[in-house]
Every structure is written in structure tokens, then in C-alpha cells.
Image (tube, rainbow, N blue to C red):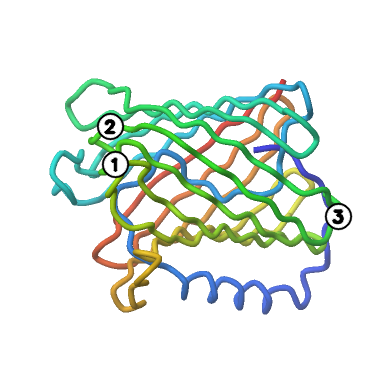
Amino acid sequence: MKKTSGSVCRVRGCHVIFVGLMSLLAAAAIPCHAAPEEIQVYLDDLSKPGKFGVDVHNNYVLSGTDAPSYPGELPPRHVYRLTPEFYYGLTKTLELGLYVLTTRGPEESAHLDGGKLRLKYIAPHDSEAGLFWGMNLEVGRTSLRVSELPWNAQLKGILGYRAGAWTVALNPNLDGSLAAHGGPVLASLDGKVSYAIAKETKLGFEAYNELGPLSHLQSLSRNSKTLYAVVDQDFTAFDLNAGLGRGLTHEADRWVMKFIVGKHF
């Protein structure tokens, strides 16, 4: 996460746009299982060249299933996931990052569940208004407790637009195994709409959606929906993204709480 600024537009007429965009995000929603190590829609934030930063990702499944979705999985109900993310600005357009995954289930101690490296690219653009785009590549090894695919990779697209106080972003994602015969490539789509009620405060919604195998996308009637109400707040010493998520179908975790605390050096 990183501070961004922008002027606040008039509220008149924006509510219609807000409702329409959120309807599109909800319509795209899809099946999901246990909460992932990071629940975040990527925007255009980057560390400056030669500068470090850290985000601490936290999420807790308040209400979810007690049954694993595959043999060896940690059932998601009452699972807390803590994921420190360290990153470094390589150039004006490239950032290198490292995730360290940990989980703690009910009545058990914390477990180290692997790590992931990422490389994020954001194309040059106006940070105050207009279109931005980029991509993020992650490669990692994770434990069976949190993933069926030990060696895995994700390619994330980043596409967004700012207009006054409004920010809209989409992350189309492709996930797959790095092992031979590791299964199909899976598709997902995440999205965010936020509105700045003050210079340092934004309110909005985030939707996290899995679409199934890329070669055979599942019908919307089979897909779960998870929608988060979120707040983004920039403080003097750190920034915060916090949200409460509601699973909208039987396949999703019913309630999930998440917050990300970021610090830039």
C-alpha cells in the first residue's frame, strides 16, 4: 500500500456510477474457499527506487466451514493468517517483494507455511487522474495446509482509473502449478471501487472472485461471491486497509475480517 492523493469531486451524479460499478463487480463473483494469505486489490502504488517498505497482511475467518476442501487442508473456520510482505523499489516502474506465510488454527500454535517472491511493474502514468495499468508475477512454495499446489505461480493484471474522488480497479489473475501435471490454470477476477470522503480517507467495496479452470470457466450459477466493505486510511506514520467480508453463497466463508498495515521507509 502507498499514499495517493487526488481532489474530491462533487457527490451529485456519482452515486449512480457507484451502484452500477458495484453491480458489475458482484456479477463477476465466483467460487472461493479459505481466505488467502493476502486479500488485496492491486493498484498503482510502487516504492521509490532504493526505498524499502513492509505491509503486514492479517485476516481471520469469523465464520466458515469446519471441513477441508481437499485432503491435508487446514479447515478455514477461525483460522488467522499473518503474512508480512517486504518490498524494495528497483526502478521507477519495478518493485521486488517477498511474502512470508503463516497460519494459526483453532487450539494450535502458529505454522510457517512457505514464501513467495513477486515482481510488480507499473507503467508510467499520471498518479492523480486517468488510466493506470501494470502486472504482477508471483512465484512461491507453500505448505499443503494452505494450498494443493506446493510450487505455484500467479500472473496478475492491474488495470484502474481515477476520476476525481473515484478510483476503480480490476485484477484479472491466472494461477497455476510449476510442477509437471500440476493441474489446470485457474482464473480469477478481483475488483475495487472506492470514493475519497477526505484527502486521507477512502471508503469502498472489494470483490474477490474465482472463475475456475481457464480452459473451462464455470457458470455464474455455480460460483460463490465474496464482497468486502473497506476503508483506506493514510496516517502520518503508516497506512491502513481494513474490511469486513461477507460470503454470498454456500461455498464461500460466511464472514472474514481483514486488515493490512503498511509502512514505507
Image quarter of residue 145 = top left
Q: Is residue 151 above or below residue 196?
A: above
Q: Which residue is mark 1?
A: 147
Marks 2 and 1, how far apart at CA: 6 Å
Marks 2 and 1 close (CB-CB < 8 Å)? yes
Q: 10 Å neighbourhood of mark 3: few (<14), some, or many (≥20)?
A: some
Q: Is residue 150 above or below residue 176?
A: above
159 sits left or right of 72 in the view: right
Q: Which residue is mark 3?
A: 7
Mark 3: which secondary structure? loop
Mark 1: which secondary structure? loop
Identified by mark 2, the residue type is Ser
Q: Nearer the viewer, mark 1 or mark 3?
A: 1
Q: Is residue 10 above or below residue 256?
A: below
Q: Position of residue 257 (x, y in %)?
A: 41, 45
Q: Is residue 242 above or below residue 58?
A: below
Disc number placed over residue 143 in the picture, else none: 2
Q: 10 Å neighbourhood of mark 2: few (<14), some, or many (≥20)?
A: some
